[in-house]
Image (tube, helix red, strand yellow):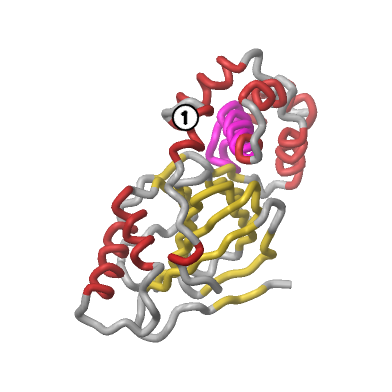
């Protein structure tokens, strides 16, 4: 069943919203008439649409445009602070789903917004905070934490199989043999369907699986071996190359958690 949520009050372009999730929680497919930024303070949120999945580590966020059907899957204990946004509030808000880096300024603005009651008057501090949030949303840096899915049935089945067997040393030739096509043919079809080269897609699938595993407390050694890396150092090198920090440090750089008393809840 598809759910629809319309959550913006009249004449207010931003509505802050706080919710905590437990490990294993999920939300079924639904959509909003407004856009949203889901900012994860702890744990990992996975957002899935018909175009693929976006994995959101702590301290980062995911932008979901208005009317995009999506579902949520929770790994670890997640403290989510969401902004629902009027899609017409700014002309150049992002048009596609993307994982984004949340700046220190935007993080502090979200904290302040959580304490603003609905129906705030125009022209005051509260409105200026909301307007500044809208300006910050226009310049969010995107992170490579999206795993696109092909729409072609045979390629989709291949991708699902790869995700279930990430410890195997997948090569283009092995995948092509599974589909009874040449490596060149698979390479061309794969890039057309996903926008990524086959090897890049496999590396990103491993990275996103690693983020979920690290979020529930798995060690770097365990994650590296489970994903088919020869050593933790090889895994750490890949992780650092993509995200700019070692996996052992990544989750420690999350945003500070808001206390329940400081945020309004549904």
Examine the rendered structure and indicate whether residue 84 appears above or below residue 173. Answer: below
Q: Residue furthest left?
A: 123
- Observer able to see residue 259: yes
| Residue 191 image position (x, y, % from top left) | 57, 36
| Residue in the picture at 58% in, 47% down | 44
- Residue 240 sits above or below residue 121 on the image: above
The crowding category of the residue bearing disc 1, from other C-alpha atoms within 10 Å (few below 14, some 14 to 19, many at least 20), is some
Left or right? Give the position of 124 relative to 236.
left
Quarter of the image for the C terminus: give it. Answer: bottom right
Instruction: Please state the extent of the stretch shown in magenta in the rendering.
Output: 189-212
Confirm whether residue 188 shows in the render: no
Residue 206 versus residue 121 in the image, above or below = above
The x, y position of residue 185, in whole percent, is 66, 30
Secondary structure mostly taken by the magenta-highlighted segment of the chain: helix
User: Nearest the camera: 128 or 229?
Assistant: 128
- The residue under the point 62% across, 58% down is 21
How many labels, in total? 1
- Residue plotted at (47% across, 29% down): 242
Q: Quadrant of the N terminus?
A: bottom right
Above or below residue 231? Residue 125 is below
Examine the structure image and report whether residue 190 is included in the region drawn in magenta: yes
Magenta span contains residue 88: no
Question: What residue is drawn where x is 63% and y is 45%?
Answer: 149
The residue wearing badge 1 is 242
Nearest the viewer among 232 and 251 is 251
Q: Position of residue 160 (x, y in %)?
A: 74, 40
Image position of 257 (left or right of 201): left
Q: Helix, strand or loop at disc 1?
A: helix
């Amino acid at each position: 069943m598809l759910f629809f949520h319309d959550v913006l009050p009249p004449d207010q372009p931003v509505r802050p919203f706080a919710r905590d999730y437990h490990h294993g929680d999920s939300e079924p497919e639904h959509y909003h008439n407004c856009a949203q930024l889901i900012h994860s303070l702890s744990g990992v949120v996975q957002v899935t649409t018909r175009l693929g999945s976006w994995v959101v580590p702590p301290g980062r966020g995911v932008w979901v445009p208005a009317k995009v059907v999506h579902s949520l899957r929770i790994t670890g204990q997640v403290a989510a602070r969401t902004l629902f946004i009027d899609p017409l509030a700014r002309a150049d808000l992002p048009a596609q789903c993307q994982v984004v880096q949340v700046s220190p300024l935007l993080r502090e603005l979200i904290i302040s917004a959580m304490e603003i009651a609905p129906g705030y008057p125009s022209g005051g501090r509260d409105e200026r905070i909301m307007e500044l949030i809208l300006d910050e949303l226009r310049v969010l840096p995107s992170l490579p934490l999206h795993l696109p899915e092909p729409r072609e049935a045979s390629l989709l089945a291949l991708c699902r199989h790869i995700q279930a067997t990430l410890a195997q040393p997948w090569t283009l030739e092995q995948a092509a043999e599974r589909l009874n096509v040449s490596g060149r043919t698979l390479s061309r079809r794969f890039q057309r369907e996903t926008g990524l080269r086959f090897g890049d897609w496999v590396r990103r699938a491993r990275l996103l699986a690693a983020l979920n595993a690290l979020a529930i407390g798995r060690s770097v050694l365990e994650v590296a071996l489970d994903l088919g890396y020869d050593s933790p150092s090889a895994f750490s090198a890949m992780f650092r190359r993509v995200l700019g920090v070692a996996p052992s440090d990544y989750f420690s750089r999350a945003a500070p958690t808001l206390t329940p008393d400081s945020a309004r809840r549904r």
